[in-house]
Amino acid sequence: MSVRPKKHLGQHFLNDHNIAQNIANTLTEKGYTNVLEIGPGMGMLTQYLLSKPFTASVIEIDSESVDYLKTHFSVLENRIIKGDFLKLSLCDYFEGQVAVIGNFPYNISSQILFRVIAQRQLVPEFAGMFQKEVAERICEKPGSKAYGVLSVLAQAFYDCEYLFSVSRFVFDPPPKVASGVIRLVRKENFSLPCDDALFFRVVKTAFQQRRKTLRNSLKSLGLSASLKEDSIFDKRPERLGVSEFIELTQKIADDTFSTQ
């Protein structure tokens, strides 16, 4: 019995044991005893997670894969969650901290990252395989064209590290692009000294028109004329690091308060 890869679910099953073991080994195993794997498929990565000294659970949206896992990984018992990670509240299944790992479907990998960030209080570590371009973007530093929303929001709360690349020919079926494995370790002090919701809004709005200066790209926020004279608004968003986006958010919050 095997599982047929389904295109609409973005399934590309890893068939290289060494790479699966290397991905499992990216976890530091520090600060948590539970690990959740997203989209295990036929369990290529799962088997190596189960050999670790933590409690591994999986979430799978594909009924055929769920049946396969129940048949071949009885040790998982009641730790197979049938559902969509993008709709999952981790607190419904885990009492404490839980690391998240997986070979993520490329069509929803950015959404998975955003979902992890939204539940960052429970996720001290996030690791796994992305499309190589996306993996590089998440870990990119300010100043390049690859640096963007994913980079800023991930790096605001996590230390991000690109670990290794993976050929497209170790999957069934092979995807059209190469892959990259990354690890995100939550910062010790991951609370921002500004309003989180406004920070997210500022970052996303700024990069919607990334070629423009902040003075122009943030027009929709209704900034005062005096604030827009600040030299930070002469810059384009790709030039700002996380700390500068925090500073920018604080300035905008103060400006909004003073003009009310």
Image (spheres, helix red, strand yellow):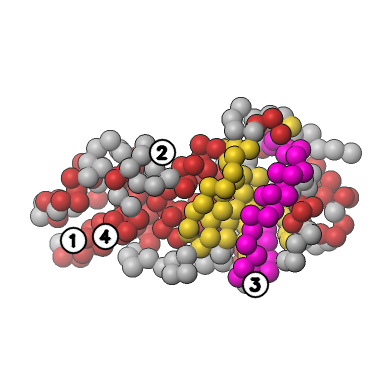
- In the image, residue 221 lies at what x, y percent? 24, 50
Q: Which residues are magenta?
A: 11-38
- From mark 4 to mark 2, how far is it between C-alphas? 22 Å
In the picture, the quarter occupied by the C terminus is bottom left
Instruction: Name which residue type carries label 3.
Output: Glu
Q: Quick check: 70 left or right of 186?
A: right
* Vertical side of 180 occupied by 248: above or below: below
Asked if labels 2 and 1 touch by Cβ distance under 8 angstroms, the answer is no
Left or right: residue 71 versus residue 173 is right
Residue appearing at x 30%, y 55% in the figure: 245
| The stretch drawn in magenta includes residue 213 | no
Which residue is disc 3 drawn over?
95
Q: Farthest residue toward the bottom? A: 95
Of the numbered discs 3 and 2, the one sitting upstream in the chain is 3
What separation in Å lies between label 1 and label 2 (alpha carbons)?
Answer: 30 Å
Could you tell me which secondary element the residue under label 3 belongs to?
loop
The image quadrant of residue 179 is top right
Secondary structure of the residue carrying tag 1 is helix
- Near-viewer residue (76 or 67): 76
Name the residue located 57 percent from the left edge and 48 percent from the top edge: 163
Is the residue 20 above or below the residue 8 in the image? below
x and y percent of residue 77 in the render?
Answer: 83, 61
Which of 57/163 is in front?
163
Pointer 3 or 4: first along the chain: 3
Kindly identify which numbered label has been placed on residue 247: 4
Q: Residue beneath label 2, please?
A: 146
Q: Quadrant of the N terminus?
A: top right
Please state which of the two labelled residues, at mark 1 or mark 2, is closer to the viewer.
Answer: 2
**Label 3 crowding class (10 Å Cα cut-off): few <14, some 14-19, many 20+?**
few
Amino acid type, mark 1? Asp
Give the secondary structure at mark 2.
Answer: loop
Residue 231 locus on image (x, y percent): 15, 51
